[in-house]
Amino acid sequence: MEESSLLRRISRALGLEAQPQPLPVTWREGLRRIPQAAALSDAQWPVYEQRVERFLSEKGFVGCNGLEVTDEVRTSIAGLACLLVLRPDSKLYPELRKVVVYPDAFLVPQEEPAEF
């Protein structure tokens, strides 16, 4: 288990989780460039930004095949993910610990159709 993941789990268990930090101005500007976020009302933006801050503080990011996960990539992924959880009763992906980011599209071979 990765050290930062272990520390995050221990902190969570002890109730010592890091508090989300306010987004830097450049990251907020990046969120405004997400086309899907343009549909948010002025009243929804503070909730949205708060969810993104929490997502970034709670979830780890792992780059694959040599990809360096930059702050811009992290913020874009968090911004898109948090558009789906804006309802007050929504949980912020409680089972998700890490986001695995690939530098390009990839295909997972599948022999049987997925069942829903």
Image: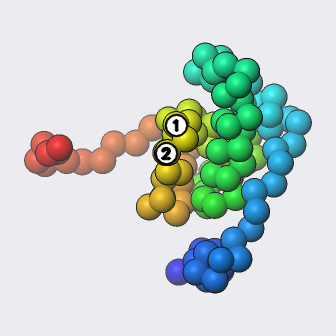
Q: Which mark is residue 90?
A: 2
Going by the numbered disc 2, the residue's amino acid type is Ser
Left or right side of 48 for 29:
right
Q: Which mark is residue 15?
A: none
Who is closer to the viewer here, 102 or 28? 28
Residue 94 placement (x, y as % from top left) = 48, 59
Q: Residue at x 72, y 48 (%)?
A: 53
Q: Quadrant of residue 4?
A: bottom right
Query: In which quadrant is the C terminus drawn?
Result: top left
Left or right side of 30 for 26:
right
Residue 100 placement (x, y as % from top left) = 52, 54
The secondary element bearing badge 2 is classed as: loop
Going by the numbered disc 1, the residue's amino acid type is Arg
The secondary element bearing badge 1 is classed as: loop
Who is closer to the viewer here, 46 or 53? 46
Residue 115 placement (x, y as % from top left) = 14, 45
Cβ atoms at labels 1 and 2 below 8 Å apart: yes
Q: Residue at x 67, y 19 (%)?
A: 41
Residue 27 placement (x, y as % from top left) = 80, 37
Q: Which mark is residue 87?
A: 1
Crowdedness near tag 1: few (<14), some (14–19) or many (≥20) residues, C-alpha within 10 Å: few
Q: CA distance from mark 1 to mark 2?
A: 5 Å
Who is closer to the viewer here, 23 or 77? 23
Q: Residue at x 61, y 16 (%)?
A: 39
Q: Residue at x 74, y 34 (%)?
A: 46
Left or right side of 22 for 36:
left
Q: Quadrant of residue 37?
A: top right
Residue 33, placed above or below residue 49: above
